[in-house]
Amino acid sequence: IDTEVSCDLEITQISDKIMKSDTYNKALLFTNITGKKYPLLINAFGSDKRMNMALEVDNLESIAKDITNFIDLSNYKGIPKQIKEIPSLARLYFSFPTKINLRKAPCQEVIEEPNLDEMPILKCWPEDGGPFFTLPLVFTKDPEDGTQNIGMYSLQVYDEKTTGMHW
């Protein structure tokens, strides 16, 4: 969508109409957002085909079967069953992120001062307190024992560098 649109309710309204129409599974790329530096992609995973591509499976049911298989402890009773499960367990092992040298990571090649005002963050409802990141991955670390967590929480944007987390 190349027509100029606003992050303040307009993108949400357009997206809502599309999602509720007969073409609900269309992904929408907004390329001309008032006052924003970056484009915005919405509904990227809105079809079974795109979800399957993202998860590298032929169908979503195969993931459910894999999870059921992983948690069924009877699959691991006895040496022959354990040996049989090695390929599945190896796949699980390689699904975890690997540690890299953060000082040399590709994401460090371009460094900019953070400025949330440049990003297309949506205000979705008229009575919202402002724009929100909806369902972002939020990485936290316990300051005492170092335990890490990843969760999805709404983040309200307060200014160009500050958000508040809603649990």
Image: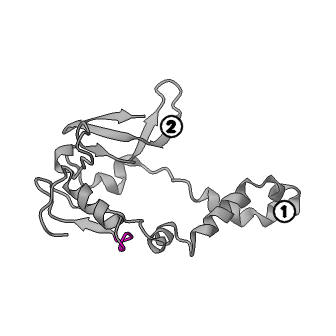
Image vertical order of residue 83 relative to residue 129, above or below: below
Q: Is residue 166 left or right of residue 125?
A: right
- Point out residue 61 in the picture as x, y percentages from the top left corner: 62, 68
For the residue marked with disc 1, what is the amino acid? Lys
Residue at 27% x, 48% y is 124
Q: Is residue 107 left or right of residue 117?
A: right
Q: Is residue 13 magenta?
A: no
- Point out residue 99 in the picture as x, y percentages from the top left corner: 49, 50
From the image, which quarter does the C terminus lie in? top left
Residue that mark 1 sits on? 81
Q: Is residue 23 magenta?
A: yes
Q: Residues within 10 Å of mark 2 (few under 14, many from 20)?
A: few
Q: CA distance from mark 1 to mark 2?
A: 33 Å
Q: Which mark is residue 148?
A: 2
Residue 98 versus residue 38: which sits nearer the camera? 38
Query: Please, what secondary structure does the residue beneath circle 2 have?
Result: strand
For the residue marked with disc 2, what is the amino acid? Gln
Residue 6, image quadrant: bottom left
Which range of residues does the magenta coloring cover? 22-26
- Point out residue 57 in the picture as x, y percentages from the top left corner: 56, 72
